[in-house]
Image: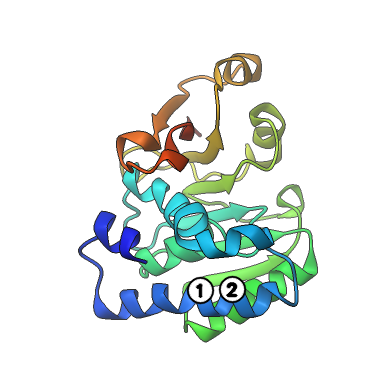
């Protein structure tokens, strides 16, 4: 939690309280539904909360921005981002019902009104468009983009323009090249967080 306050010093008292509750909530639910590696629960704030908020170092979501979180698991990166951007709308989806149940319980406990959680695959979502899609490395970039390429609104209201914000680690040059996607940008989270954990962590931005 101290790390979080160090990198995000302008949180409101309400936001601080919501983030503080995350450890107890995930400890409780992780004992019942394994949504986080059990050895990682002690590192929840660094490896899950702060990692999710790496996206906020690249994009500041404006009020009414609509974001789709694909393969959210237990709610990452969606829940930490929803706390930080309470005036944006988040649609968290995962194919596994038990994980979506945890997302709903955590969101309810935190009184997060800007989250919708749904058990569905991204490619099954119809008649909805978003400003941004976020995710934590559920597949190779080329495969993932095929699932979500038709999910974007055409008109962008902020910079960077609508697109994918993909949390991934390692050397991604081959993966980006093989995807054939245009305008891809990599942002190193080591430029924003000085923990060793972030040395190889990136946010990959792909414009819609």
* Quadrant containing the N terminus in the rendered view: bottom left
Query: For the residue carrying disc 2, how many other residues have a C-alpha within 10 Å: few (<14), some (14-19), or many (20+)?
Result: many
State left or right for residue 48 relative to residue 84: right
Contact between labelled residues 1 and 2, with CB atoms less than 8 Å apart: yes
| Whole-percent x, y for residue 77 in the image | 52, 56
The colouring scheme, among rainbow, by chain, secondary structure or one colour, is rainbow
Specify the quadrant of the image occupied by residue 21: bottom left
Q: Image quarter for residue 46?
A: bottom left
- The residue drawn where x is 36% and y is 50% is 56
User: Where is residue 192 shown, x and y percent of the image?
Assistant: 30, 41
Residue in the image at 64% along x and 30% along y: 141
| Residue at (64, 64) in percent of width and height | 74
Residue shown at 46% from the left, 50% from the top: 51
The local secondary structure at tag 1 comes to helix
In the displayed structure, would residue 72 be above or below residue 83?
above
Residue 80 visible here: yes
In this rendering, position of residue 66 left or right of residue 70:
left
- Label 2, label 1: how far apart the Cα atoms are: 5 Å
Crowding near the residue tagged with mark 1, few <14, some 14–19, many ≥20 C-alpha atoms within 10 Å? some
Label 2 residue SS: helix
* In front of the other: 154 or 195: 195
Residue position marked by numbered label 2 in the rendering: 26
- How many labels, in total? 2
Q: Is residue 11 left or right of residue 150?
A: left
Q: Nearer the viewer, residue 79 or 86?
A: 79
Which residue is tagged 1?
23
Reply above or below: 165 against 34. Answer: above
Q: Tell me residue 146's x, y (percent).
A: 70, 34
On residue 105, the disc is none
């Amino acid at each position: 939690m101290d790390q979080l306050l160090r990198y995000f010093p302008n949180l409101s008292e309400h936001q601080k309280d919501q983030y503080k509750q995350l450890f107890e909530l995930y400890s409780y639910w992780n004992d019942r539904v394994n949504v986080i590696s059990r050895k990682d629960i002690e590192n929840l704030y660094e490896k899950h909360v702060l990692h999710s908020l790496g996206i906020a170092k690249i994009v500041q979501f404006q009020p009414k921005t609509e974001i789709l979180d694909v393969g959210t698991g237990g709610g990452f990166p969606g829940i930490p981002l929803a706390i930080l951007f309470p005036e944006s709308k988040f649609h968290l989806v995962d194919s596994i019902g038990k994980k979506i149940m945890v997302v709903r319980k955590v969101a309810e406990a935190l009184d997060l009104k800007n989250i919708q959680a749904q058990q569905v695959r991204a490619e099954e979502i119809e008649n909805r468009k978003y400003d941004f899609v976020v995710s934590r490395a559920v597949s190779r970039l080329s495969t993932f983009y095929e699932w979500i390429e038709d999910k974007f609104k055409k008109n962008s209201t902020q910079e960077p323009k609508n697109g994918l914000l993909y949390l991934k680690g390692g050397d991604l040059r081959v993966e980006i090249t093989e995807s054939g996607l245009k305008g891809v940008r990599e942002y190193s989270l080591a430029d924003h967080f000085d923990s060793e954990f972030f040395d190889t962590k990136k946010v990959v931005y792909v414009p819609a």
